[in-house]
Image (cartoon, helix red, strand yellow):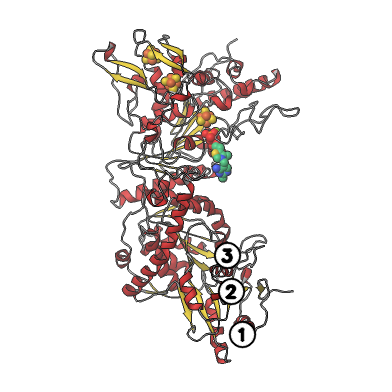
Amino acid sequence: MMNKNLPGWRELPEGAVVRDPGNTETIDVSGWRVFKPVIIDDKCTRCRLCWIYCPDGAIIEVIDEKAKMGKRYEVDYVHCKGCGICYAECPVNAIEWVPEER
Amino acid sequence: MALKEVGPMEEIRNHMQIPRPEYIAGGHSACQGCGHFVIIRHLLKASGPNTIVVNPTGCVEVVTTVFPYSSWKVPWIHVAFENGGAVASGVEAAVRTLQRKGVLSEDEPINVIVFAGDGGTVDIGFQSLSGMLERGHKVVYVLLDNEAYMNTGIQRSGSTPFGAWTTTTPVGKKWKGEWRVRKDMIQIAVAHHIPYAATINPAYPVDMYNKMVKALKADGPAFLHAYSPCPTGWRFDPSKTIEVARLAVLTGYWVLYEYDHGKYKVNVPVLKRKPIREFIKIQGRFRHMTEEQIKRLQEIVDEQVEMINKLVGRTVIGPVEG
Amino acid sequence: MPRLALTTNYAVAHAAKDSDVDVIAAYPITPSTPAAEKLAEFAANGEIDAEYIHVESEHSAASALVGASAVGARTFTVTASQGLIYMSEVLYIASGLRLPIVLGVASRALSAPLSIWGDMHDIAVLRDAGIVTYFVSSAQEAYDTVIQAFKVAEDPRVHLPAIVDYDGFVLSHVTEPVETLEKEEVLKFIPKKITWNTLNPKNPISMGTVGEPDWYYEFKYQQQVAMENALKVAEEVDEEFGKVFGRKYGVVEPFMMEDAEVALLAYGAHAGTARVAVERARKEGIKVGLVRLKLWRPFPVPHLKKLFDGISVVGVLDRAMSLGAPRQGPVALDLMAMYASDPSSAPKMASYTIGIGQRDVRVEDILYIINQLAEFAKGKEIPERTIPIGLRE
Ligand SMILES: Cc1ncc(C[n+]2csc(CCOP(=O)(O)OP(=O)(O)O)c2C)c(N)n1
Ligand code: SF4
Ligand code: SF4
Ligand code: SF4
Ligand SMILES: [Mg+2]
């Protein structure tokens, strides 16, 4: 079926190139999750492993002078798919695995 | 004191130094826990923004670039399935010529990286890779090995391990999964007289990062063979991607070693190996294996370990713990 | 203007050199091998400032050129036969990616049986790929057309690959005098200007994305529009080439068409043989003309319609066979389709195959065809099939 709301051939870039690279960032994949990781900041030792191992780049390292050791780790819940790697790999169990409520 | 983050193309001493900028965006549609993306994230961090990526057909390509979207923040091209080596050869040759002719600036060297699957490398893209290595193009070719054709739904490749179930090596009355021994791609790459080849594994990010830096700095083609667990095709829970990757190293199934200008080195020694049983028991693709098959797979791993120990000239990977 | 004695293979190599190509990737195959060798010789002597990639296959030759063109390089290769169809997967992609790669093709038969000899089966396979395709009929024309092909391919209204096709052996290996041009004057005609999408870290883009059902069709249509544009652009470029260098060819070349009653449509080297036959037939009182098809893709519909207006029968001489099609000749099929929406304006059309696998094509063979056309004009029924010429029963 033809989607009339999409641009016509004249308006599309030649050769199907994407000129706005990285724009999958605008895609919300939160719907993939059954569980979500929740970082307990008090327990977090800033070891950085969750940030390293996340396939979706969904752990954000936030520089914050007021935070313990000058930074803290947050989950980007738009891009986190809920794979559980961060939860499995956190060496100090600072990540809780919480069912998504829908 | 924590070490400071480095810029691209610099080796690191610990994982705190891995630079923060990301060159692959989230929001792509890879399965939960896909190993490919842990690897790609870090290799691109090591390479930095002055990079052109060539990406043959496969999971990575399909999940990142469905028009009008792309996850790639560096220039990226996909042409076909079997020609990653040749496309990269052309990119590299063109960059070199256009720099010489003053069309592109010579001040900022451009890294050319191929991210190809095992199907796109050990099978259909084998010849194209061989040509690229033999001709000496300065390209880093990264084989993202998830040990089967995943994009088309888990079919065996020349890199599928002994015993593994795939949809084309199913478990039936006669067949019990894959029955042949996979190709040794590092040895094949080294046979092309290239300066640098290494195995990498996402559970060892510092080793992986530094090998990428060495590969980028090599005076010719470099080949990185990345172990890339695929929860969907290997039948394990996506939270276990790093655990599976780590067990591959701890069992000697995946030895982390490198070939650097004629010298072999094991980068992650394993004094006492875990039995291969530990590695296969958490993956559904090996669930059907008989005692005899497990014994055979252990033998295959032992032989590979022995070969690598010989290459480095001493026993760096030890025996299976008793 | 240096005047050299060159085969067509050498002529296309010279044209690539004089066009200052940046990257060449070539693989040997008869009858295009001497062109690949000539280019290597230029590189070896530093007469050309290009990377010469010694690819391990034609598939890789096309792939490497896609990579190079995607970075902004001017690229060239030569091939034939199995090599061309081995490239075909990648050439479809090159067109879809809108990359202005130029190829010289010394057309040759396709296996099996293996034949190193000339015909146009190879180029016929690429007919639908979205590649601007020229047929030439002399070494000079091949030289000039390679230069024109770069200008057409790189034109922003086009941005498609282009092929300059020349008959294997009959043209590829025959030496003729060729006036070559100085690189400086060629570059004035085809300045190095990157107008197509390229990979550059300063402005990162993604090329070769997935086209889902919501999008794929629009991109294919863009290619079709680019093809349609190429007809006008090819004419403009030929016109300009004529003004600057004094030689032009047209997208079709009529011969004795002014008062013709029947006509031949031919291409490549055999158009030359047909010309001789037409002259002879004229002496015998047959009012026959000839149209040489120079540009096959895009098909020059308005030009042919104009030329064939009022002609009673057109005989199409094809050097390839589309097996199982309503007629075997690929150009005959095009011509018939051209009149599909307006059959009342159409001449009667007869399809012939000639020169298959280098079967000799003599002037007598074409005279035989012309005589048949004259009979068809008088009312004799045209068989509903392609008429094979020079075939043993
Ligand atoms: C010439 C050709 N044959 C087959 C395919 C279908 N195909 C696309 S991707 C793919 C498998 C990719 O496997 P691999 O290279 O291992 O990458 P993965 O998806 O596992 O990461 C296949 C068979 C194709 N695109 N082109
Ligand atoms: S659950 Fe997976 S996707 Fe989500 S933040 Fe943790 S590692 Fe990343
Ligand atoms: S892995 Fe755990 S301790 Fe380490 S940074 Fe992440 S949350 Fe903190
Ligand atoms: S099938 Fe495997 S390799 Fe492909 S996206 Fe899913 S997890 Fe990644
Ligand atoms: Mg694979």
In the rendered image, which residue does mark 3 sit on? Answer: C108
Q: Amino acid at mark 2?
A: Leu
Q: How far is the residue under mark 1 from the one under mark 3?
A: 32 Å
Dot 1 or dot 2, earlier in sequence:
2
Q: Badge 3 local density, few (<14 within 10 Å), some, or many (20+)?
A: many
Q: Badge 2 local density, few (<14 within 10 Å), some, or many (20+)?
A: many
Subunit that carries the residue with mark 2: C
Q: Which mark is residue C8?
A: none
Q: Which mark is residue C317?
A: 2
Q: Which one is in front in this view, the residue at disc 1 or the one at disc 3?
A: 1
Subunit that carries the residue with mark 3: C
Q: Is residue C321 above or below residue A75?
A: below
Instruction: Check the picture and name the quadrant holding the C terminus of chain C.
Output: bottom right
C233 displayed left or right of B242: left
> Are tags 1 and 3 found on a single chain?
yes
Q: Where's residue C137, x and y in %?
A: 49, 73
Disc 3 C-beta below 8 A from ligand 1? no
Residue C218 can be seen, yes or no = yes
